[in-house]
């Protein structure tokens, strides 16, 4: 894979390969021990703590004066609650429980989901509005920086201090992480890259894609083995910051470990999150005329093949990290959770879903039926 100029012909791009690859996530004894330890932490602490954090932000969201912003805040908390749970899974990475880190994960994900809704609603106000809104993602991870006027170009401005409260909560949590200064520069760089979210909602597809491609060329002037839409998709997911902040929870973290962790998560793990989200929602996106990242591939078959390759690459990179089994568990759970969606089990998608799941390795295939059951129970409880 490589970053190409806009005029590069489709025929020069990667072709599907049927070569068998090693198990990307084998269910070894070490993997089982890591999984058991993570499950215990989640069940005895994590899930309850996340619920408390989300409940806190829901109470504040109900007090937002502007009806449209209040709707966006509450709707994001309701529809995207799984995103908060997913972000909080990273709280299993530090050696010990860290409530400040978990609070940071939830609050930052709530900002991300809220801004996605507000930016989409205000797409008609232009990319300038979206970029201004998403400054909150930078300020939230920069305790010494300014807090800016995020609604400067927005048609709706009265949120009763909701977004500022989220930003300030994140900043406070950052100062409580003992090694935050060691990861600060990298997490802020990734937060700045999230400006691509503003382009994602541009209703003019040609203008949007050209802007995203230019962004990738500017950000990676020397080229990259990932395609431009994989890079911008990765920037739209933001998983690297969560992993780096986990390192910041420890008293000591060296620069080599920080660099290796970041390289595994950006673009590979983040691109997987974006592409699988797009894969699961592609029928809905097509019906609504929304931007679909997976539709950038030259054909549906190549889209599935390359997404499967991204999954394999992601898990291989994560396995090589210190505490690799823990990182693999998070990524395999993410892959299985996306593939357990009802849309991925439709008759016309089963073969493609199976293809992607195979590249997720043994752990992903083991988790897939478990998460399908979890989804069924969750929907029954919500009904």
Image (spheres, grey):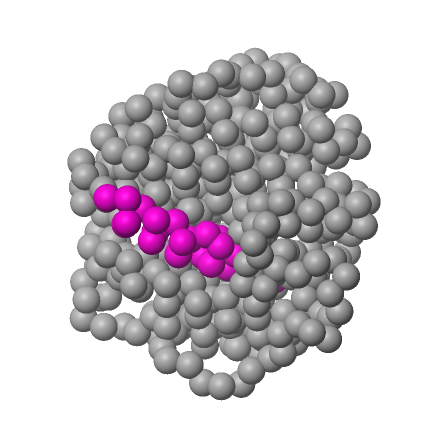
The spot of residue 190 in percent (x, y) is 48, 40
Q: Position of residue 195 (x, y in %)?
A: 60, 37
Residue at 28% from the left image edge and 58% from the top image edge: 321
Nearer-the-camera pick, 320 or 57: 320
**Quick one: quadrant of the N terminus?**
bottom right
In the displayed image of the protein, which residue is found farthest to the front?
Answer: 222
Q: Is residue 77 visible?
A: no
Q: Could you tell me which residue is drawn at 45 percent across and 34 percent down? A: 188
Give the percent coordinates (x, y) of residue 147: 51, 16
Toward which corner of the image does residue 113 lie, by quadrant? top right
Query: Is 268 contained in the magenta span?
Result: yes
Q: Is residue 252 above or below residue 166?
A: below
Q: Which residues are magenta?
A: 254-279
Q: In the figure, is residue 185 to the left or right of 194? A: left
State the image quarter where residue 160 is shown: top right
Q: Residue at x 46, y 52 (%)?
A: 266
Q: Nearer the viewer, residue 244 or 376?
A: 244
On screen, residue 43 above or below 152: below
Residue at horizontal 62%, vertical 27%?
133
> Is residue 349 shown left or right of residue 96?
right
Q: Is residue 18 left or right of residue 358?
A: right
Q: Check the image and name the residue furthest to the bottom.
A: 19
Is residue 15 positioned above or below 263 on the image? below
Residue 146, magenta (yes or no) = no
The total number of labels drawn is 0
Q: Dominant secondary structure of the magenta stretch?
A: helix
With 381 as the anchor, is 213 left or right in this view? right
């Amino acid at each position: 894979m490589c970053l190409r100029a806009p005029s590069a012909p489709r025929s020069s791009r990667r072709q599907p390969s049927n070569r068998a690859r090693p198990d990307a996530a084998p269910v070894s004894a070490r993997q089982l021990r890591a999984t058991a330890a993570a499950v215990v932490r989640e069940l005895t602490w994590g899930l309850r703590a996340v619920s408390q954090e989300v409940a806190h932000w829901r109470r504040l969201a109900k007090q937002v004066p502007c009806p449209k912003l209040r709707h966006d805040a509450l709707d994001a908390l309701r529809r995207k609650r799984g995103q908060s749970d997913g972000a909080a899974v990273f709280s299993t990475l530090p050696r010990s429980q860290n409530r400040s880190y978990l609070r940071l994960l939830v609050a930052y994900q709530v900002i991300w989901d809220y801004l996605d809704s507000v930016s989409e609603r205000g797409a008609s106000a232009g990319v300038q509005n979206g970029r201004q809104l998403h400054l909150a993602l930078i300020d939230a991870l920069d305790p010494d920086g300014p807090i800016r006027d995020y609604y400067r170009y927005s048609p709706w401005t009265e949120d009763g201090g909701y977004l500022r409260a989220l930003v300030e909560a994140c900043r406070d949590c950052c100062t409580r992480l003992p090694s935050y200064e060691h990861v600060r520069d990298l997490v802020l760089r990734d937060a700045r890259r999230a400006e691509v979210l503003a382009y994602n909602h541009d209703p003019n597809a040609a203008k949007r894609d050209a802007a995203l491609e230019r962004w990738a060329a500017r950000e990676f002037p020397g080229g990259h083995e990932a395609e431009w839409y994989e890079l911008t998709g990765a920037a739209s997911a933001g998983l690297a910051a969560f992993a780096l902040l986990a390192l910041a929870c420890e008293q000591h973290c060296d620069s080599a470990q920080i660099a290796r962790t970041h390289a595994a998560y950006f673009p590979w793990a983040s691109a997987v999150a974006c592409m699988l989200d797009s894969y699961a929602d592609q029928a809905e996106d097509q019906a609504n005329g929304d931007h679909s990242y997976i539709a950038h591939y030259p054909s549906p078959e190549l889209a599935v093949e390359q997404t499967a390759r991204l999954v394999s690459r992601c898990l291989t990179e994560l396995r090589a990290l210190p505490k690799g089994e823990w990182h693999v568990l998070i990524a395999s759970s993410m892959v299985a959770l996306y593939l357990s969606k009802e849309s991925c089990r439709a008759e016309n998608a089963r073969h493609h879903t199976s293809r992607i799941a195979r590249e997720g390795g043994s752990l992903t295939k083991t988790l897939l039926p478990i998460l399908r059951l979890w989804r069924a129970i969750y929907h029954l409880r919500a009904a």
